[in-house]
Structure formats: C-alpha cells, structure tokens
Image: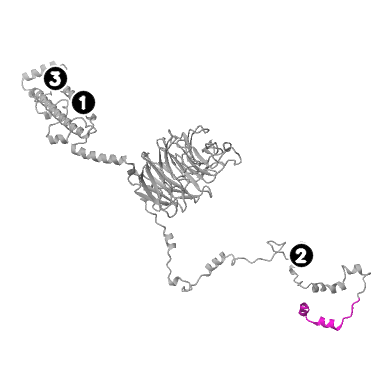
Amino acid sequence: MDPNRVEEASGKMSGDGDISSVMGFSGFGKKARTFDFDAIFEQTRRTAIERSQRALEERQMTQMEEKGESSKSVKSSVHAQRNKAAAATSRKQESDSSSDSGSDSDSGLIGPPPPPQHTTQDDDDDDDELVGPPLPPGYTGSTAHSDEEDEEGGAQDDDDDDPVKKIPDTHEITLQHGTKTVSALGLDPSGARLVTGGYDYDVRFWDFAGMDQALQAFRSLQPCDCHQIKSLQYSITGDVILVVSGNAQAKVLDRDGFNVMECVKGDQYIVDMANTKGHTAMLNSGCWHPKIKEEFMTCSNDCTVRTWDLNSEKKHKSVFKPRSFQGKKVTPTCCTYSRDGKLVAAGCQDGTIQIWDRNLSVHTKFHCRQAHTPGSDTSCLSFSYDGVTLASRGGDDTLKMWDIRNFRKPVNVATGLTNYFAMTDCCFSPDDKLLVTGTSVKKNEGNGKLVFFDRTSFQRVYEIEVTDASVVRCLWHPKLNQIMVGTGNGLAKVYYDPVKSHRGAKLCVVKSKRKEKQAETLTQDYIITPHALPMFREARQRSTRKQLEKDRLDPKKSHKPEPPVSGPGRGGRVAAHGGTLSSFIVKNIALDKSDDSNAREAILRHAKDASENPYWVAPAYKETQPEPVFAEESEEDEEADKEPEWKKRKI
C-alpha cells in the first residue's frame, strides 16, 4: 500500500472528527522509534578507534618482561578502557535520549530491540566487573594477588626443575619371589603385569589388578628346566615374553606362560658360527626390538649376537660377530637396541663396546676398545630416551656415560659401585635427567643401594637403601612412574608415590586380604574334650547293615572263596584231573611227600621190588651175572649194626 495514501487517509480521519466514532478504537498506539543514522555512524567510528588502541596496548603488554610492571600497566590500561567505555555508553545514552525525546517511556518500544547498554557504576563495582576485551594471559587480578601467585608458581617451577623430587620412593611393597637371587625383571608396556625370574629356575607372574594385600603370584613355572633365568622382557605389544636362560635356546612365552616359540640350537662342531642356525653355547642376555614386534636379539658364549624372527624359529635372522683388536673372537655379555632400533650394541668380555648398524652386520659402526677393564663382564647397556647417550655398567665397579657421536672417551664416569653380578642393571629416568643403578654387597656386610646420578653433572644426588642384600635388577617404568627392584635375597620391591605414580602397585595395596573359608579354619584348630577320647567314649550299638557295608568295602573280608578248579586250570592253579603230561607230572610231584634226605635209604627202598621183579638192568646180565658171595659177619659187625643211628652218624 502506498504510504502517501495512508497519510492522506489518516489526515481525513483526524479532520473528520473523533477516530473512535469512525473506526471503533482510540488510536494506532505508541509512535514508532526513530533512529539517527549520523549518531550511529559516529559511535561506530569511535568504537573502531577504541579497539585499535586496545590491540596496541595488548601488544605492548606482551612484550614487557617484568611481571610487576606488566600487572600495573595492565591495570591502568583496563581502568582507561573502563572510563572510555563508560564515556561511550553515556554519549550513546544522550544520543538515544535526544532521538527519543518526543516518544513515550522506553518500557514499551515498538520496533527492533535496542542494543545492550552497560550502566555506569562505582569504582568498586568497576573493579569487580570488567568491561572490555578479555584480559591478557599475564594478568591475574590485583597486584597483591599476582605477586603471591608468582611466588607460588616460582616454587612449583623449582619443584618441577628438581629431578630428585620426582623420584617415587615414599611407599614400597615387597613381592616374595623365593630365597635365591632375582636375576630378571619384566614389566609389560601397560604396567598391568610383572614377571620375575631367578636363580631358583622359577618364573613368577604378578598381576597388580588381580592381587590383594597378600601379594601372591598367580602363576609360577620353570620354562627352562634346571637353568638359571638370565633375562625376561615383554614385547612392545605386551602379548609375549622373551625368556633367556643358561641354556643355548631362548624361549618365547605368552602372557599366561604357555610356550610360543623355542629357538633352534646350532651345530657346535662347525667352526664358523655364521653357518650355524642358532647358538651353540650358554646365553647371556636378550631383548626385543623397540619398533618391530616380531624381532628379538640374543647374545651367547659362542661369541655371536643373533637376531631372530618370531615367525621363523628354524633359523636366526642375522649374525653379528664381535672381534678383538687382533681379530680374535670375543664373548658378548650384554646386548641392546637403540631407541629407534637402527643400532645394535654389545658389551664384550675384553672390555670393549661394539655398535653395529642393524642392517650391516659385518663391520662395526662405533667401537670403543677400552670402555671397561678387560676380563670384567659388562653387565648392562642402556640408551637414553633421546637416543644420543649410552650408559654402561661394568664389572669393574664403574658406571660410564657415552656420547655415541664422540665414542672415544666417556662423557662421565662414576666409580666405587660394587658389582658382583653379570646382570646388574642401569636405566634412565622417564624425564631423561637421572641415571639409576644398583650396588652389590657381600653377606652381612651392609645394605644394597639404589643410586641415582644426575645426567648433566653426574653427581650422586640420591640413594635408597633397599635391603641387606645386593641390588641386581632395576626398572623405572615411564607410564606408571614406579621403580621395580630385584635383590639378591629373593625379593622384588616396587617403589611408588601415591601422588606422582599411576596404577601398578596402587591397585593392590588398597584391596584387603580375602577371608579364608570356614572349612579351612576348622581343620587348623582342634578342640579336644575328655569324652572325645576313645578311652572315655561309651560303646554304642552299631547296626549290622553298616557293618556289612564296611566289610564289603574291605578287600580281604569281602573276598569270595575260590571254587575247586574244573578243567585245565587257570590263574596259576593246577586242575585236579589234567589231561596233559605237565599237569600229570606236577600233580604227582605235589602228591609225593617222601623224604629223600637219606640217599641210601631212598635207594634201598626199591631193592626188594627190583629183586622180585627185575625189569631194567637185571635181565640183561641174567646169564652172565655171577652169584654174589658175601663174607660172614663177625660179632663186632653185628654189634655195630645194633647201635643207634645217631651214634653211627657221629662216628
């Protein structure tokens, strides 16, 4: 509809008289709000200027170094912004009031809603409710609060910078593996299960989530029969375990201890060890590849380091042969991969440390000929998490740190660390700032310690007295932030901090011990009353039926009498009327009860029968046989014949 016509119609209506008489209502309501476009443009220009000024001030504040000055300048700028914003709002209100002077009250406006306006308040309210853009990161409130928080933040930064305060040693639990040395420790990547091995040939499995305060292993086995366990390690996926023992064949077990693979044994009569399929002598150490889950490595007294594939147990994957300066064979005592898996390192019995490229097994990439004292067993090699530093624990009571980029001389050396075991560990902390190793002691000569060294200064910054035996194995898990220790008296200790550590030992210490069953408790304690003894017990009538049932269970009382044998006989018994010659002879022998102890009487027993009825010998010599002529007996012979028989035998 044309607005001009609407205005003309409204004019005619007003001119004609009262609107209510014509249209039925008093009017069109309140007047519509009018806008001043010049004032709106001016306000927009001022807002843009203020925003540019605020951006410039924020940029200057971020460049300031001192926190106190920054907080003060921020506060002044914020107050200036508040004053400018208050002035802008007041000017906006004045413009709005001037534009709305002809209109009624603002409570019932018709048209679009007005823009939100901030009412001016006192200075105290301005301090509480900020007006303007969000505050910069460095601003925390008033200067007093900022100073206090800065001091607290500085203290926290100091705690974070101090690596000693990150050592989780406030609490500990003790796992009883056995009575002999715990020579191997392994923890899966998730930190849920711990496996321990020792000189007692046992491998024990511990589940932190399944244990209670009794701290009992859920499985114990002897995977390598009567061979000491040298090394245990979970793969990077945690589904299989590498078991290295004193025999020549390494084994791979699954998480529950069942056999997955056993390496083949090589031919010990071949001179070149590269031509054999496996090791021919006792193993010393082994480890998994940090990136490839199917590959692992072992070293042995046959002077070789071999890599294996989990899917092919018939032959090794590659062979590394350490050599001395004269080119002779050298026995590797420990081996490890670098963190990226590209390097293979071995510590040898002649004191050298030799490092190969994993793909080139002929020549060494790094070779230090006098790393440790010749003849001492290097017990452990460990790479740092950054892959640049190598730590070596020697049998010469030293701990050395090397930079593989300059491998001729050690970066730092620590001495006086007694080592009696060929598998004493050393490892880096999860933040790569500390180096940890254990010390050995003789029986009743002190306590074994866990010693911490600062990686930069190589100062002994902390130590933990573990037990009255040697500390052999140590393991600092990066995910749990807990330290596992294996000792020489059969203990496996776990050190943790309730705040800094996660899961692991914290899961089992909160569980109470399971209650014993009622039947088990009754069998342990006996209460004997006088009338319970047989001498005081009254005889009671027993039913014949129960007695017959008991007699039936007795094999002697319930034995059925054997009937007479009828037929050829069975079961070792001879029949009464056997039809065979053997049964006839046996029967006659059994019935013949004559005493044949006197041979003369036994022969003369048949003399009468032979003279009356000669059958065998007498008829043959009947015609030529002379008649016997016997001498007459004298009186002495007759008397001798009359003497008793016992006198004759005595004579």
Rounded to the nearest whole Å, what is the CA distance between mark 3 and mark 1?
Answer: 28 Å
Q: Could you tell me which residue is drawn at 59 percent across and 66 percent down?
A: 558
Q: How is the image coloured?
A: one colour
State which quarter of the image contains the C terminus: bottom right
Q: Is residue 289 visible?
A: yes
- Height in image: 511 above or below 427? below
Q: Residues within 10 Å of mark 2 (few under 14, many from 20)?
A: few
Q: SS class of the residue under badge 1?
A: helix
Q: Residues within 10 Å of mark 1 (few under 14, many from 20)?
A: few
- Height in image: 12 above or below 373? above
- Name the residue that disc number 1 marks: 56
State which quarter of the image contains the N terminus: top left
Mark 2 against mark 3, which lies toward the viewer?
3
Viewer-closest of 184 and 370: 370
- Name the residue that disc number 3 marks: 38
Residue 456: image quadrant is: top left
2 or 3: tag closer to the N-terminus: 3
Residue 408: % across, % down: 45, 35
- Name the residue that disc number 2 marks: 585
Rounded to the nearest whole Å, what is the CA distance between mark 2 and mark 1?
Answer: 134 Å
Residue 345: % across, % down: 47, 37
Residue 155: image quadrant is: top left
Rounded to the nearest whole Å, what is the CA distance between mark 2 and mark 3?
Answer: 150 Å
